[in-house]
Image (spheres, coloured by chain):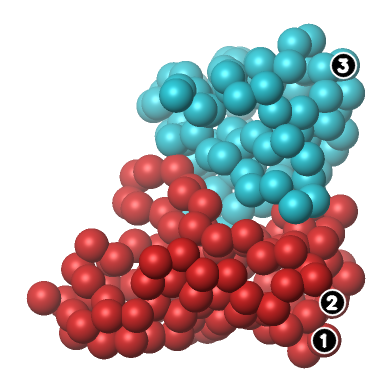
Chain colours: A cyan, B red
Amino acid sequence: NAGVTQTPKFRILKIGQSMTLQCTQDMNHNYMYWYRQDPGMGLKLIYYSVGAGITDKGEVPNGYNVSRSTTEDFPLRLELAAPSQTSVYFCASSYFLQGQPQHFGDGTRLSIL
Amino acid sequence: KQEVTQIPAALSVPEGENLVLNCSFTDSAIYNLQWFRQDPGKGLTSLLLIQSSQREQTSGRLNASLDKSSGRSTLYIAASQPGDSATYLCAVISEKLVFGKGTKLTVNP
């Protein structure tokens, strides 16, 4: 069981560069989520998707974009990277929002210098 | 706006002690509450999920309770072990998942 797989695990970007964080799940989950975790600040929701072709903003969407062309994949795109986007990014998935546990990937540690 | 608070922020106990971690939330209109464990440099592992209609859930040495009316949940860990050392996060699920900042637990041998 692979569960939720995130790539890359680590990345260093220069200010202004762009990149895509990959997330894929093999559990046929409907819901997928992107969070960022900053030291001492807990997790904040960036974007989420309730199914292929449907995405919606979370609490901190500025500077990010997502797409959901398949049930399995939910990539997160950073355009014009800024130091404030230095963080650990987690992807998660679940069958539904209510009543079902969320499964998390191991995270992508991103530094913007 | 839903806010989730976890107290204490850090806790250090000797091995074998029973302990309680606290989680409070401001809006009682939730679907369920989930407790997670996070090891350093790792993702989150789901420990227990309590439906809004339930009062508690148990898994092994872990017991989580939920009191929606007072906006509180507790995670009870019995006979703590050094391997329990981790950060424990609670999250409430209403329209979205809202996380607390976590309690960092250290169990000393």
Q: Are marks 1 and 3 in contact (CB under 8 Å)?
A: no
Residue B12 appears in the figure: no
Residue A54 location (% of width, % of height): 88, 23
Task: Pick whichever of labels 1 and 2 is earlier in the sequence.
Answer: 2
User: Chain ID for label 1?
Assistant: B
**Left or right of B109, for residue B7:** right
Residue A99 location (% of width, % of height): 75, 52
Mark on residue B56?
none
Farthest residue in the left direction? B109
Q: Amino acid at mark 3?
A: Gly
Circle 2: is it few (<14), some (14-19), or many (20+) Cα within 10 Å?
A: some
Q: Are marks 1 and 2 in contact (CB under 8 Å)?
A: yes
Q: Amino acid at mark 2?
A: Ser
Q: Amino acid at mark 1?
A: Ser
Mark on residue B69?
1
The residue under label 2 is B28
Residue A46 location (% of width, % of height): 72, 40
The residue at 33%/51% (across/down) is B40
Q: Do marks 1 and 2 share a subunit?
A: yes
Mark on residue A53?
3
Front label number (1 vs 3): 1
Alpha-carbon span between mark 1 and mark 2: 6 Å
